[in-house]
Image (cartoon, helix red, strand yellow):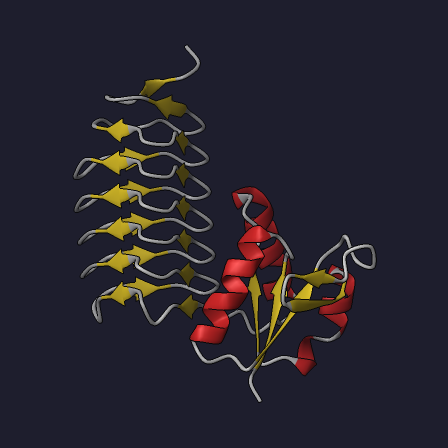
């Protein structure tokens, strides 16, 4: 029986667990630091906290981090790798991923997402439901492409950046590290590190 440990029993975690089962994982168990107050996440059992996960890594065939906050997810992935965890990626069978795309460790690609040829997805990134990532994009570690977001060819999304739900990014644009693209924004020029941009065309929220 293939057993998967999921760190982070959130709403996002539910979708990760469902994706895992659709991808063939037979048993999914959560770990969360809100345990023992939190002992279930919808249909799935919460077995312990993050320390309990580190103590029981040998019991699982794989581990994935289901924490929506990019910085926290990045940190937890590094901790798990340092502890020798078998970090795995999940690909929903209803996602379309080119055979010529490169998918890192700890990545989750949800249902309806499209990842086209020669795109590189870094460790711990999220390609969420119905997002499209066209050819030759580079998605950095722990970045998040939200549901329904669309990236044209050659877009670069740096580490821990967040492209909001329904956003659109023009070809060859670069989005900096830790930047946030607001929901529905239309990005036609580069976004600096740590910036927050909103609107059509997208402009900095804070001047």
* Placement of 127 over or under 44, stated as above or below: above
Residue most extreme to the right: 36
Question: How many numbered marks, from 0 up?
Answer: 0
Residue 143 x %, y %: 43, 46
Image quadrant of residue 102? bottom left
- Look at the image and tell me in which quarter the C terminus lies: top left
Residue at 43 percent across and 51 percent down: it is 141
Residue most extreme to the top: 207
Residue 83 x %, y %: 66, 67
Judging depth in this view, the residue of 78 and 151 nearest the camera is: 151
Image quadrant of residue 206? top left
Residue most extreme to the bottom: 1
Residue at 45 percent across and 28 percent down: it is 194
Residue at 20 percent across and 51 percent down: it is 134
Residue at 31 percent across and 68 percent down: it is 94
Asked if one can make out residue 151 in the rendered structure from this viewpoint, the answer is yes
Residue 14 x %, y %: 56, 59
* Placement of 173 over or under 32, stated as above or below: above
Residue most extreme to the front: 43
* Placement of 43 over or under 123, stated as above or below: below
Asked if one can make out residue 190 in the rendered structure from this viewpoint, the answer is no
Relative placement, left or right, of 56 versus 165 is: right
* Placement of 107 over or under 162, stated as above or below: below
Relative placement, left or right, of 158 versus 178 is: left
Residue 33 x %, y %: 75, 54
- Look at the image and tell me in which quarter the N terminus lies: bottom right
């Amino acid at each position: 029986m293939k057993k998967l440990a999921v760190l982070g029993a959130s709403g996002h975690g539910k979708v990760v667990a469902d994706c895992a089962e659709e991808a063939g994982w037979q048993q999914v168990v959560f770990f969360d630091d809100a345990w023992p107050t939190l002992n279930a996440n919808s249909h799935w059992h919460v077995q312990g906290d993050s320390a309990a996960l580190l103590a029981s890594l040998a019991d699982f065939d794989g581990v994935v981090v289901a924490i929506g906050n990019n910085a926290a997810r990045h940190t937890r992935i590094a901790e798990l790798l340092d502890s020798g965890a078998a970090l795995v990626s999940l690909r929903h069978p209803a996602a379309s991923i080119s055979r010529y795309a490169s998918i890192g460790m700890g990545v989750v690609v949800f249902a309806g997402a499209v990842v086209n040829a020669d795109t590189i997805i870094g460790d711990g990134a999220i390609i969420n439901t119905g997002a499209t990532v066209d050819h030759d994009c580079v998605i950095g570690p722990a970045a998040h492409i939200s549901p329904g977001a669309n990236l044209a060819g050659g877009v670069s999304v740096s580490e821990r950046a967040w492209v909001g739900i329904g956003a659109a990014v023009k070809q060859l644009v670069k989005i900096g590290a830790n930047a946030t693209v607001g929901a529905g924004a239309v990005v036609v020029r580069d976004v600096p590190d740590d910036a927050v941009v909103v609107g059509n065309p997208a402009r900095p929220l804070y001047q």
